[in-house]
Amino acid sequence: MQILTAMVLAAFAGYIGAWYFGAIEGNFALLLFLASVVTGLYWLAERFYFLPQRQAAAIRLEAETQERRMANEKLGIKSDEGGELVQARERLLMQPWWLDWTAGLFPVIVVVFLLRSFLFEPFKIPSGSMIPTLLVGDLILVNKYHYGIRLPVLNTKLTDGNKPERGDVMVFRYPPRPSQDYIKRVIGVPGDEVAYLNKRLTINGQPVATSEMPEFFDEDVMRYFKQYGEALGAKPHRMIVDAERRGGFSEDEIGDFPARKNCRYSVEGVVCKVPEGHYFMMGDNRDNSLDSRYWGFVPDQNIVGKAFFVWMNFGNLKRIGAFN
């Protein structure tokens, strides 16, 4: 078992190392699921096989020691093996290293797996596409049950939950590359006609209300950007635009995505009709966001959860708190 366990642990370490150095495209949910299964099997083996064997060996040791003590007493020999017996018993009951690193870790791994899969999952914001709502380095929490409970790894929905609403900040599997998670704001729900023309957002023919706000200073690029309050959902949020960037699109910027025929592109911008079971997503940093304008719609099965709280930013502790 020691050799087998060493091979299993080496396989996990190799997978993590290859993922870290970019040799393969990793899947953390799958890794955590496999770790839960493997350590769970070791935990069961320890609970119902290995531990009872060690306990039986300790009982035999105590019985043999007692028999030896009684035999010595009949011969008039006084023996004191109490201390040695305790140490020998502890050595017999001690969990070997290969069970420490498997069965011993099972409770922690399975709790993390269940919390991450069905309740809350942490994410780190890697880019500036959601500035000013979310900054690079923000560590956020995502509610995994708000839009319905889903099976881990497979992402199959088990319960309906709430429907995504305009204005929600949502984490989803990036449609062109489902192993990668993206975060954007829900702009259009099924049936909506979303128009983003000349940097103005219109939904179903109604312009989305905006209000001017003080300019936003982006410390990463050391520039000021025009900032607006936008009343898209139940609560207003902020967004920024780059006055130096054009608002239209060229053909080489647009990918070939499902339901591409639902979108019309021009030098002014884009107009899209959102298909059933899909959502139109955009970043709050409107001129620096790779979103549905470029790669299309997010299907319902790609939804991961609703982002709602910044739990840490090591560079700026004032960032901690809820956001819209």
Image (cartoon, helix red, strand yellow):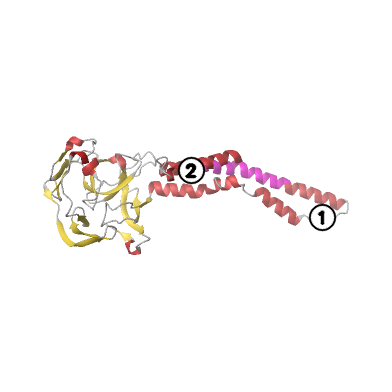
Q: Which residue is mark 2?
A: 35
Residue 79's label in the rendered image is: 1
Give how far apart the Cα atoms at labels 2 and 1 are.
Answer: 49 Å
Other residues around mark 2 within 10 Å, as few (<14) / some (14–19) / many (≥20): many
The front one of 22 and 133 is: 22
* Local SS, label 1: loop
Q: Is residue 103 magenta?
A: no
Q: In the rendered structure, which amino acid carries the disc numbered 2?
A: Ala
Seen in the image, is 97 located left or right of residue 133? right
Residue extending farthest right: 75
Q: What x and y, as percent, mark residue 139?
A: 36, 55
**Residue at screen point 15% across, 52% down:** 208
Quarter of the picture containing the C terminus is bottom left
Seen in the image, is 213 located left or right of residue 63? left
Other residues around mark 1 within 10 Å, as few (<14) / some (14–19) / many (≥20): few
Q: Which one is earlier in the sequence, the residue at label 2 or at label 1?
A: 2
Q: Main secondary structure of the magenta part?
A: helix
Q: Give the magenta range.
A: 37-60
Q: In the rendered structure, which amino acid carries the disc numbered 1?
A: Ser
